Image: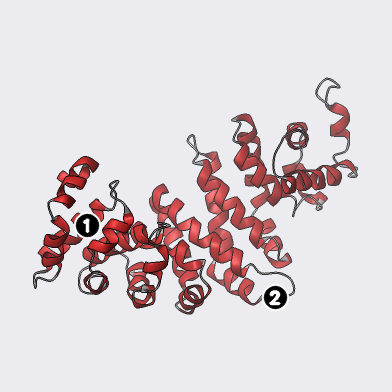
Amino acid sequence: HLCTESDNISELCNLGIMTKLEQMMRMDKDDIKREAAHILALIVNGNVPSDFLYRQVNLDDLIESADPTKDLQTAEHAFKVFSYFANSNYTKQKIMVRMNEVIPDLITALKLSEGNKIDCVDILPELLHLDHYRDSLMKYNVFQILIDILRTALKADNEELLASCLIPVTIVLYYYRPTDVNDNFGRLIREDGASDALVDILKKVEMSEVNWGILNRAAYGIELLSQNSKNVADFKILNMVTYLTKALSRAYGEQKEAFYSQGVKTLAYYSDDQRLFPQMVSAEMIKMLASLLDRNIDESVQQHAQVVLSHIAISPVAAHLFVDIPASEA
């Protein structure tokens, strides 16, 4: 209870609590080890400098406690501490040297149906940005595991887990994004059902309350997958453009610029198909696209907006919408 207040944490550290926790972690009683790991996980949430804590923690004990087959809760607390060190500029390089010892236990924890996956998932982004750890994780089929977690989070409407899980999913897609030239990973993605999961997330735009951060990350994942024509075909079958257009329209109305900037980049992969225009194009959509050209935003967003506008302008199906926009708004 004391460790829930950052002021208390500093005083406890000055009084030598880290030494006591190290002694508890070495005791031959699971419940005491679990409580020590829990306290340590609470301490890293405080404002204590990470380099100070790193010097106080016995990594050998922490790595040993990360085995979820011995005690899942203790392992999850250990992963919380690892994630904290991995996300700190002061301790990232130091902790990463030891992560190869933790990856098998991390994968085991992610596969288990029970437990809180967030602390395990949160350590993945830093690992996935490093070539040797990324390759190691991919050998353990981490992408399939993440998609399974994503589906579980969707079913349970667990937005916190959904938001955490989407980050490593899109990092994997960024590094292994399939193209028409190299589609080996693209085939695996289609088998894993990643496209379906991302569209299901996009459908959340129809709910009364929308987490735009989650939708933004899903749209980014769809953009990465859309660099492969087979995935584009799959997304068309899944009616993805309908939900993306709804999300763009709502984001424009609610001034969620981050989403409609990302959404337009995704939409550009589909705007050359006039069969999709009935569900995609409207005067409101044209106004939104035009507004992006008149803002101080990322140049690539403006370029994608121009692509979509040009596809609409040369279409006999939709070009009349430009005429319907009042001159004052044009």
Q: Nearer the viewer, mark 2 or mark 1?
A: 1
What is the three-letter code of the residue carrying label 2? Asn
- Along the line of sight, the residue nearer the viewer: 247 or 18: 18
The answer to whether 257 appears left or right of 161 in the picture is right
Q: Residue at x 56, y 56 (%)?
A: 198
On the question of residue 157 being in view, the answer is no
On the question of residue 167 being in view, the answer is yes
Q: Residue at x 63, y 67 (%)?
A: 177
The reply to whether the C-beta atoms of the residues labelled 2 and 1 are less than 8 Å apart is no
- Check the image and tell me how it is coloured: secondary structure
- Near mark 1 (Cα within 10 A), the count class, few <14, some 14-19 or many ≥20, is many
Look at the picture and state if 233 lies above or below 204.
Answer: below
Residue 188 location, quadrant: bottom right
- Along the line of sight, the residue nearer the viewer: 206 or 52: 52
The answer to whether 88 appears left or right of 22 in the picture is right
The residue tagged 2 is 182
In which quadrant of the rendered image does the N terminus lie?
Answer: top left
How many numbered marks are there? 2
| Residue 203, percent from left and from top | 55, 47
The answer to whether 250 appears left or right of 304 in the picture is left
Q: Residue at x 41, y 57 (%)?
A: 87
Q: Which mark is residue 233?
A: none
- Along the line of sight, the residue nearer the viewer: 117 or 56: 56
Q: CA distance from mark 2 to mark 1?
A: 45 Å
| Residue 100, percent from left and from top | 39, 77
What is the three-letter code of the residue carrying label 1? Leu
In which quadrant of the rendered image does the C terminus lie?
Answer: top right
- Near mark 2 (Cα within 10 A), the count class, few <14, some 14-19 or many ≥20, is few
The residue tagged 1 is 40
Q: Secondary structure at mark 2?
A: loop
Residue 102 location, quadrant: bottom left
Q: Spot the residue most to the top.
A: 328
